[in-house]
Image (cartoon, rainbow, N blue to C red):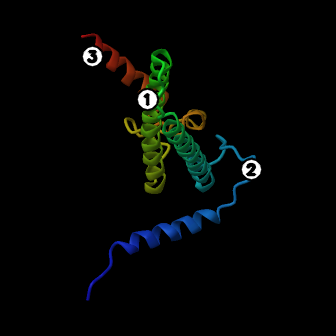
Amino acid sequence: MTVNHISEPAGLQQRAAAMKAEIFLPEDYRPAENEPFMNERQLEYFRRKLLNWKQELLDQSAETIEGLQESGRNVPDIADRASEETDRALELRTRDRQRKLVAKIDAALRRIEAGEYGYCEVTGEPISLKRLDARPIATMTLEAQERHERRERVHRDE
């Protein structure tokens, strides 16, 4: 008798998605300091925010790919060709940044599923709701992030 381990996680994901769809979240909902930190509504708010952001990036990426494919024509004028190559390189750099951002969004979604979202990976303290709302992929409190950046600068300058 063989057990299919591949379909079970997919089934769990579908059930988890169905449960999340049941969480009522008013359109004007914003996480507030006076409610329990990372309660079900806050987690759902950030999950939806991250999923929407990811979808926007994926849509932009598809547009970029279409644009690059259309601009692949052979331009005879050297100046026009150079300009087109510069535009293409810029688009590819932007696309690479978006790809890295999608990976960070996916990591944040995994932290939500694991119950680790909203807490600093360095100190374990809650990350402020304002910070998470502005940067939902944040993994550190503002103070921990500033310390990290100062250490990076010192090591870079050495």
Q: Is residue 84 above or below residue 6?
A: above
| Quadrant in the picture for the N terminus | bottom left
Look at the numbered disc 1 and give the secondary structure of its residue. helix
Nearest the eye: 67 or 20: 67
- What residue is at 42 percent from the left and 38 percent from the top? 100
The disc placed on residue 155 is 3
The disc placed on residue 27 is 2
Amino acid at circle 1: Arg
Residue 8: horizontal and vertical position, in percent? 39, 74
The disc placed on residue 93 is 1
Q: Is residue 19 left or right of residue 142?
A: right
* Circle nearer the viewer, 1 or 3: 1
Q: Is residue 108 left or right of residue 26?
A: left
Look at the numbered disc 3 and give the secondary structure of its residue. helix
Q: Reading the chain from its start, which is encountered first: label 1 or label 3?
A: 1
Nearest the eye: 90 or 19: 90
Instruction: Give the CA separation, mark 1 to mark 2.
Output: 35 Å
Amino acid at circle 2: Glu
- What residue is at 37 percent from the left and 17 percent from the top? 150
Mark 2 Cα within 10 Å, few/some/many (few <14, many 20+)? few
Q: Is residue 18 above or below residue 116?
A: below
